[in-house]
Image: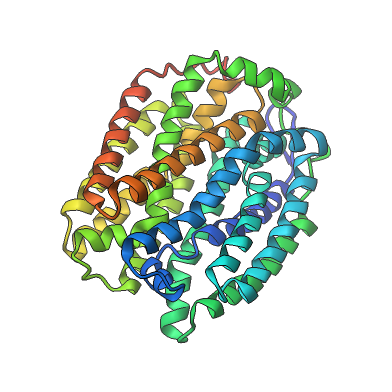
Amino acid sequence: MENTEKSFTLYRRRWAVLLSFVCVNAVMQYGWAFFSAIVTDAWKFYGFQDAASGEAAISALTMIIMVCMIVLSIPASWVFEKFGWYKTVSVAGVALMIITLLRGFIGGSSYTALVITTIGIAITQPFIINAFGIISAKWFPPSERGVANGWGMISTYLGVMLAQFGVPWLMTTFGMDIPGALKVFGFLSIPMILWFVIVSREAPPTPPADEKVIERVSFAEGAKLLVRNRRFICAVLVFWLMQGVYFTLTTLLEPILQYFNNGSLEGMFVGTLGTILTVTGTITTLILPILSDRSKNKKRKPIVLVCQVGTLVGLGLIITGHTMGLQIVMACCMGIFLTGVTPVLMVMGYETAYPVSEGTSESLMQLGANGWGLICLLAVNGIFKGNHTGTLAFFIGGMIVAVVLTLFIKEASLKDRRLV
């Protein structure tokens, strides 16, 4: 145990709880990002005849997960409130483990079987990912919540990285086919999820901060407050716009890069770029919340603005960067500025939402982000149909809107945000 200067007790177990949750969410994320570095190989394996229909079919797997997130985010908030986050995540995690294993054995047999198992994985997502804010509120003091949310986001990036690099590595190094790689990832889910069930708990014996900082209004009352909260609306729209870019790039990174490089890139190199993006994003996800939490005024907005400009530079390099060096710089830009800023965005959303609970604000943020991500994928596949010049123009326009909205956000004082 650790004693804080205000006599609240912090338990070292909080880090074990957080890291065990990282493992569960990583399984969830590599489930939906599995095909991100092998999109072309995947649609050919499942029997699609052309790039437009093939990319749409693989994108549909991500869209299934987004639709379930949109439909089930609000019910998930009620379940968290009713049964607690630990029981909810444990049940969803065990279900995810079983479905991921099943996907390994039948998901490679046909596209229909793959869709069915993807639906199963998708149903578990909101009952896992929406626990980010609740864990940080129950186990961590306000001064560490940016870091806690950063680690929550690292779980997302870890899962994506396992898929982006791990899948092409297994196929290239060991000559595995898609069904074989699915099985490997299915078995990997067993220790990662069981560790969470064994190690994690609902809350520490005593709270890490003043109860007023932890106890919040109910979901129903909180939702009513948020629809009238202009600061939260601006913050959540920025989060949605930036996450939409991230979701789409994660799903279609390989075909987008191939489009701007005339199909000259090797799959392993694309996977490496995706891994660079994720690794730099992971490192930045750790650093930016620490800088934000430890700064004198704990402002989030300046960090967000810098990262938005950096994201625009990265999007420009996707179009113009055709050398290996520029492509690596592009991956670093998208990792550092688009991916790394996510926990700071989330904390800014929570703080503008106070006194609404993190579970409620998290659910609405994730619901909308998945909704916008779904719109982005529908636009890419239904309107642009493989013309990724239109895709990048769409992304750049959305990022410009995000910059404008961020400029209108007025952050509350430290006292109002309960950070003093």
Q: Is 310 rendered above or below residue 169?
A: above
Where residue 352 sits: x, y (%)?
53, 21
Outermost residue, bottom side = 175
Q: Picture coordinates of residue 413 (x, y %)?
A: 51, 15
Identify which residue is drawn at 53% across, 32% down: 347
**Residue 79 appears anywhere in the view:** yes
| Relative to 270, 134 lies left or right | right
Q: Answer above or below: position of 192 versus 362.
A: below
The residue sitting at 35% across, 58% down in the picture is 253
Q: Which of the image's four quarters has the N terminus?
A: top right
- Camera-nearest residue between 202 and 169: 169
| 334 w.r.t. 94: above or below | above
Q: Is residue 316 left or right of residue 356?
A: left
Q: Nearer the viewer, residue 44 or 371?
A: 44
Can you tell which quarter of the image residue 420 is in?
top right
Can you see residue 157?
no
The picture quadrant where one finds residue 131 is top right
- Residue at 62% over, 46% down: 129
Give coordinates of residue 312: x percent, y percent: 26, 40
Looking at the image, the residue that sits furthest to the front is 49
